[in-house]
């Protein structure tokens, strides 16, 4: 990680940060700015100096601003346990250059490892602000983008019994959908009972629609990773059903029939 050291002169009013739990991302809201610019702006606010700890410029260079071990001044109410990173640019309207995205990703990954933390937030997550802008590629830089998650994740070991679902919104939506599609005429009460089970249609590969979507949601919720919830019963959904069936000692056919529904319904 190449961090360019700066010679910014801070006032002596900064305190040491006792704990580092998260990283908070900002944009400068300025299309072009240097480390010195930010330092000057923040001195003019009456602060000790630049409030962020790092600046990532559009060309991918990374500058140190406030000393890393000092409490920053970048996100009111969240400064005491965070590191602030500012990205040159105005990302309500601009598009971030790839070099800056790459440098931001590297810096965030470096800090996560250094402090053994995983929490990354946008300024707007902690304060009433639009910072760092709607075009800011937050997930990519924070390292939470879905494409970074390996596809072949092993399903979490399933509990021997699925949790009881009374009062659950998923059950309510399933009941409503089974009624709407004419599979049942049951009371929509969020409680999985024998009418709910009887009203669940057999679903298999090739099915699509809201009931498939509910099956996918439930499989993912139980740790049987069926990938994207897209309402299409494809091979990943089928494999997730097979895993569930295997764990629960059912016939492994990938078809959601009454016995499989019983498990999904936690009955
Ligand atoms: Zn901000």
Image: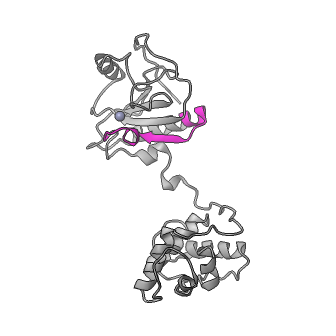
Decide: is 101 above or below 248.
above
In the rendered image, residue 189, in percent from the top left (x then y), is placed at 48, 76
In the rendered image, residue 55, in percent from the top left (x then y), is placed at 40, 28
Left or right? Give the position of 26 relative to 222: left
Q: Which image quarter is the C terminus in?
A: bottom right
Residue 218, picture quadrant: bottom right
Residue 31, picture quadrant: top left
Seen at 37% across and 35% down, the residue is 26
Left or right? Give the position of 94 relative to 70: left
Let me know if residue 129 is in the magenta part: yes
Quadrant hosting ligand 1: top left
Number of numbered discs present? 0
Left or right? Give the position of 45 relative to 216: left
Q: Nearer the viewer, residue 89 or 85?
A: 85
Left or right? Give the position of 85 relative to 160: left
Seen at 36% across and 44% down, the residue is 136
What range of the chain is rendered magenta?
111-130
Seen at 62% across and 73% down, the residue is 266
Colour scheme of the rendered structure: one colour
Q: Nearer the viewer, residue 265 or 62?
A: 265
In the rendered image, residue 182, in percent from the top left (x then y), is placed at 43, 89
Decide: is 133 above or below 225.
above
Q: Nearer the viewer, residue 207 or 244?
A: 244
Decide: is 186 above or below 163.
below
Q: Nearer the viewer, residue 242 or 19?
A: 19
Q: Is residue 86 visible in the rendered structure shown here?
A: yes
Let me know if residue 232 is in the magenta part: no
In the rendered image, residue 89, in percent from the top left (x then y), is placed at 31, 35
Q: Is residue 102 visible in the rendered structure shown here?
A: no
């Amino acid at each position: 990680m190449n961090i360019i050291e700066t010679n910014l002169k801070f006032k002596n009013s900064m305190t040491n940060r006792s704990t580092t739990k998260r990283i908070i991302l900002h944009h400068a809201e300025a299309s072009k700015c240097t480390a010195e610019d930010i330092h000057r702006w923040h001195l003019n606010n009456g602060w000790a100096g630049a409030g962020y700890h790092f600046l990532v410029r559009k060309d991918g260079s990374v500058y140190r601003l406030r000393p890393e071990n000092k409490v920053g001044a970048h996100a009111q109410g969240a400064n005491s346990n965070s590191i602030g990173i500012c990205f040159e640019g105005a990302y309500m309207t601009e598009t971030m250059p790839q070099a800056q995205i790459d440098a931001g990703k590297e810096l965030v990954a470096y800090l996560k490892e250094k402090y053994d933390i995983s929490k990354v937030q946008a300024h707007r997550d902690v304060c009433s602000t639009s910072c760092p802008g709607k075009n800011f590629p937050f997930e990519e830089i924070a390292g939470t983008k879905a494409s970074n998650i390996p596809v072949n994740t092993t399903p979490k070991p399933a509990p021997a019994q699925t949790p009881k679902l009374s009062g659950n919104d998923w059950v309510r939506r399933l009941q409503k959908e089974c009624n709407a599609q004419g599979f049942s005429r049951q009371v929509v009460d969020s409680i999985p009972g024998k009418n709910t089970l009887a009203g669940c249609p057999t679903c298999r590969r090739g099915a699509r629609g809201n009931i498939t979507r509910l099956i996918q949601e439930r499989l993912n919720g139980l740790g049987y990773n069926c990938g994207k919830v897209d309402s299409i019963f494809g091979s990943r959904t089928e494999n997730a059903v097979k895993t569930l069936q295997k764990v629960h000692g059912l016939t492994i056919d990938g078809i959601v029939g009454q016995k499989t529904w019983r498990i999904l319904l936690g009955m």
